[in-house]
Image: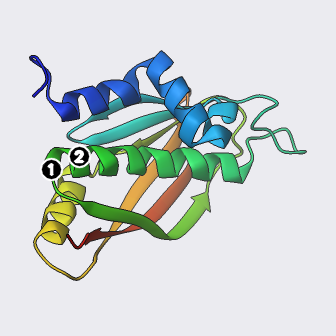
Amino acid sequence: MIGKFSKSDMFKSMWTNPVATKAMLWAKLPLAAFAGLRVIKLDENGAEVRLPAGWKTQNPFRSTYFAAQAMAAEMSTGAPALLYIEQSGKSIASLVTGLTAKFTKKATTTAIFAFTGGADMRAAIEKASQQDEPVVFTAKSAGTQKDGAVIAEFEITWSFKRRKS
């Protein structure tokens, strides 16, 4: 603990503070920073990531490019994974090993991608911390527009593995 905040509290704050997030994204994920992705919620249940509409994320058909949607969906599952690994206090590697997507409506406005399977992801990370074999977890993230319309559903497959000392 540092003062009254734990290391994981500081990690969570970094992901949800707009200035800290922007600096971290430009340093580690410049494409996400350029697109304007923002983690707007990160907690024990999962995360929400805002994907702005506009020229930076637009395809030639005046809708949001599928790759920008995939980036937001992955971030909505990746931020919690990193938080839960940090909270575990163990050295665990994480890697995306698969992705499937279903696009249900043309994305034309700002969208929110939400992952709500935090408890199950945390259990997979805990299991990985106790064995030598990787643990595979499939996280589901859904993107919705302001009107509540679902624009896309993603399944991102993560592999979590304890690092050898």
**Front-lying residue, 151 or 43:** 43
Q: Is residue 136 visible?
A: yes
Counting every numbered tag in the picture gives 2
Residue farthest toward the right in the current orientation of the protein: 60
Residue type, label 2: Glu
38 displayed left or right of 7: right
Residue farthest toward the front in the current orientation of the protein: 165
Residue type, label 1: Gly
Give the image location of residue 22, x and y in percent.
Answer: 54, 25
Give the image location of residue 134, x and y in percent.
Answer: 27, 78
Q: Is residue 149 visible?
A: no
Q: Count neighbours of disc 1 (C-alpha within 10 A) and say few if under 14, some if 14 to 19, many if 20 or more.
A: few
Colouring mode (rainbow / by chain / secondary structure / one colour): rainbow
Q: Is residue 129 above or below residue 117?
A: below
Query: Which residue is at 32% across, 51% downward?
Result: 81
Q: Quadrant of residue 129?
A: bottom left
Query: Which residue is at 20% across, 40% downward?
Result: 44
Residue corresponding to mark 1: 89
Give the image location of residue 34, x and y in percent.
Answer: 69, 32
Residue 86, label in figure: 2
For the C terminus, which image quadrant? bottom left
57 displayed left or right of 140: right
Give the image location of residue 72, x and y in percent.
Answer: 55, 44
Pointers 2 and 1 in contact (C-beta within 8 Å): yes
